[in-house]
Amino acid sequence: MVSIVATPPSPSPGYNPLVTYLDSTNKNQPAFRYIIQIFPQGSANLLTEFKIAPRPGDGYGYVDISKIVSTQLSSNIDFFSTGVYDADQGTIFNYDLKFGEEYIATWAFSDYQYCNTTGFIGLTDLTNFSLTPHGYSVGDQVAVTLTTVYNNFRDNLNGFFTVVDVPNAYTITVDLAFIGNGPVTPGTVQYADGRKTRATNQANSLDQIAFNRAYGFEAFHVYDQNTVLPDNPMSEIQTSAPDTGFRCKLYQYLWWNFYDGETNTIDEIWFENSLGEQFYKTAGGLGNVYMKCAAVGPANHGPLTPVGAATLPLIKPGVEWYEVYGVNNAASPSVPSTNPKRIEIDRRCSINQHQLLFLDRAGSWSSFSFSLRARESQATTRTTFRKEYGDQNGGPTANVWGYRTWDAGETTFWVEQATSWQLNSDFLSNEMSSYFRELVSSPEVYMLLESGLNETPPTWRRVHITDSNYEIQSTKNKKLIRNVVNLKLAVDDSINI
């Protein structure tokens, strides 16, 4: 029987180890394997099943399902949203784990006996009084192995036989002529083809939550799900943007995730600026969802409701920063459900107003502005072939070979282009320099050029970062930190040919 020794907390980040330890009372049986099954929560549709051997020493089953679970996670972005939307699709995987076992089942008999009705050997457990039923039927092919090598006639009991009679649940008769009387001779019986006894769902871990996040090595070893669950002093907005030193231009976009855990605890997103004014937008009305994504950037925070004497807009002359946090308005009085994140307003002049929006390692969407010089380049690839030019009427005389001056010998039959950009950031804080590496390594990045800012909605283009190396700089070594990023469009314009 399988039992669970340890399980990961729920919710857990889906890209970090999700380890379960198993134990079984049958782990010493021949060819023993633990069976692991993963189902979408509440569903009978099996996602996957695999088996593992017990590890040496303690025989525990070590199960890490993070590689499987992470395939069910992706991203969720709504470029049109200026409010709060349901981000469960892609950022949350709710699943059930079920555990079982399989092994080559052996039946222990305590002695052999003569069977009067057939004249064959009977193997029985009745004399041992343990009364372990064998489960065999007439016609089964079995392998018999004695516990000890006797070096006498009793060793003839070893071998492969057919069950010819089943006198009771604790005795079988095999097709071996009686070998004579002898002392007590115990042994074991198993199916001759090595078939296994299999049992599933002997233990389970139901309604587990994995969310789209990858903690660093140093951070994950102290992971506490209370940093995710709302209405907790440790609760955080699900972004890896720095708590301080994160600067944004007025034209930048941000969409950040708030874990709500189907409790509808976070029903408002609050904003508080450096003047002490408070504003909010509703986050309720989405039903029971795990992850809510809120537009919180300077350019896309959307319509807000002032609190008390506050006056719109949120960002006005004199505002140096604003903070964002989730609030449980159903509580009395209203209480923050998450700790705040501060966004500092960057009012430095910009040569360009380009920005890159990227999926950070916490599953939220942040952006960096690239306000200095930008370079666009295009690489064109042509595929050509050579053909004959001219024909019998190509010249001035009929029916005489000739050619025209515009005839082509080398002809292009395919053209494609690759558009690349080199963007230069403004000067960064230490915190932003460290956060910048998440942009460089992000699997999903979108570019918004200055020319697309005035369009509704803005024109985002999917891009791929082509840089493979990134130096994390510090003001201790370099007073002014500025980064350059190289990228290419994921889809180029078509060319007619």
Image (cartoon, rainbow, N blue to C red):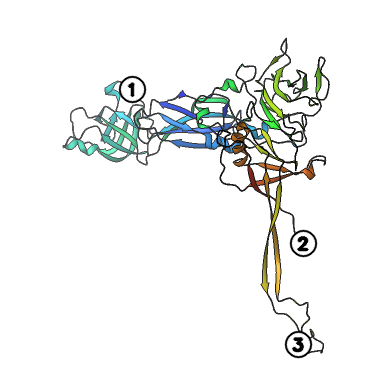
Type of the residue with mark 1: Leu
- Residue tagged 3: 401
Q: Nearer the viewer, mark 1 or mark 3?
A: 3
**Where is residue 474 shown, x and y percent of the image?**
57, 35
Quarter of the image for residue 372 reads: top right
Real-space Cα distance between discs 1 and 3? Answer: 104 Å
Question: Disc number at residue 496?
Answer: 2
Secondary structure of the residue carrying tag 1 is loop
91 relative position to 283: left or right: left
Identify which residue is drawn at 20% across, 35% down: 149
Q: Quadrant of the C terminus?
A: bottom right
340 relative position to 185: left or right: right
Binning the other alpha carbons within 10 Å of mark 3 as few (below 14), some (14 to 19) or many (20 upward) gives: few
- Tag 2 or tag 3, which sits nearer the N-term? 3
Of residue 73 and residue 305, the one placed in the foreground of this image is 305
- Residue tagged 1: 131
**From what the image shows, is residue 221 above or below residue 195?**
above
Binning the other alpha carbons within 10 Å of mark 2 as few (below 14), some (14 to 19) or many (20 upward) gives: few
Of residue 30 and residue 389, the one placed in the foreground of this image is 389
Type of the residue with mark 3: Trp
Proximity of marks 3 and 2: CB atoms separated by less than 8 Å: no
101 relative position to 430: left or right: left
Binning the other alpha carbons within 10 Å of mark 1 as few (below 14), some (14 to 19) or many (20 upward) gives: some
Quarter of the image for residue 437 reads: top right
**Where is residue 320 shown, x and y percent of the image?**
74, 25
Quarter of the image for residue 28 reads: top left
